[in-house]
Amino acid sequence: MLGRTLLAVTALTAALVIPSAAPDADAAALAATTLTNGDDGQTLSLPVGREIRVRLQPVRRNGERWTWSTPVVSATDVLNRTAGRTTPNGGAAADIRVAGPGQGYITAQRTCTPTRQGHQCGSVSPEWRVAVEAH
């Protein structure tokens, strides 16, 4: 009888001392979402606290080199850009945190530079844009 009592007390003590795992919602908030050139036009539904990494790569084709501006955010109460930069090769990057509920946008401008003599780029500078619905 004493053996069973000691075993029960030991099990109870272990249950009280072992920390539990973080809830799934907390783990989701700590995860990061990475966005690239191909995510243009997407709408994302993300929880408050989620980290977003934007990584845009330059594009070379048909005598043109397309480079990026530093990504910016709208609705700073929803999206908080914590870092942003362009890269020497013409790419761009930003780190963004979903700061509060609502809707915001992440945008970057693409600019063309001719790489072939006599070639001219069109006058349009397309915008890369992703909508974020934060909850």
Image: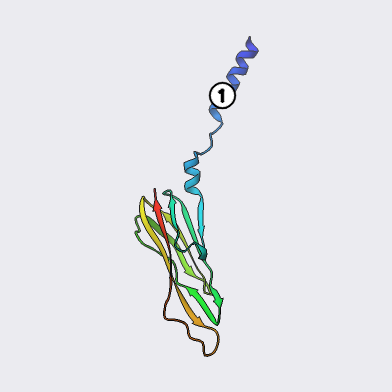
Q: Is 41 rendered above or below residue 91?
A: above
In the visual, does 52 lie left or right of 15? left
In the visual, does 116 lie left or right of 127? right
What secondary structure is marked by label 1? helix
Residue 5: image quadrant is top right
- Expressed as whole percent of the image width and height from the top left, the position of residue 109 reads 43, 71
Q: Mark 1 belongs to which amino acid?
A: Thr
The front one of 82 and 72 is 72
Residue at 52% from the left image edge and 90% from the top image edge: 118
Q: Is 14 rendered above or below residue 116?
A: above
Determine which residue is flagged by label 1: 13
- Expressed as whole percent of the image width and height from the top left, the position of residue 45 reads 43, 51
Local crowd size for mark 1, using a 10 Å CA cut-off: few (<14), some (14–19), many (≥20) = few
Q: How many marks?
A: 1
Residue at 63% from the left image edge and 9% from the top image edge: 1
The front one of 52 and 110 is 110
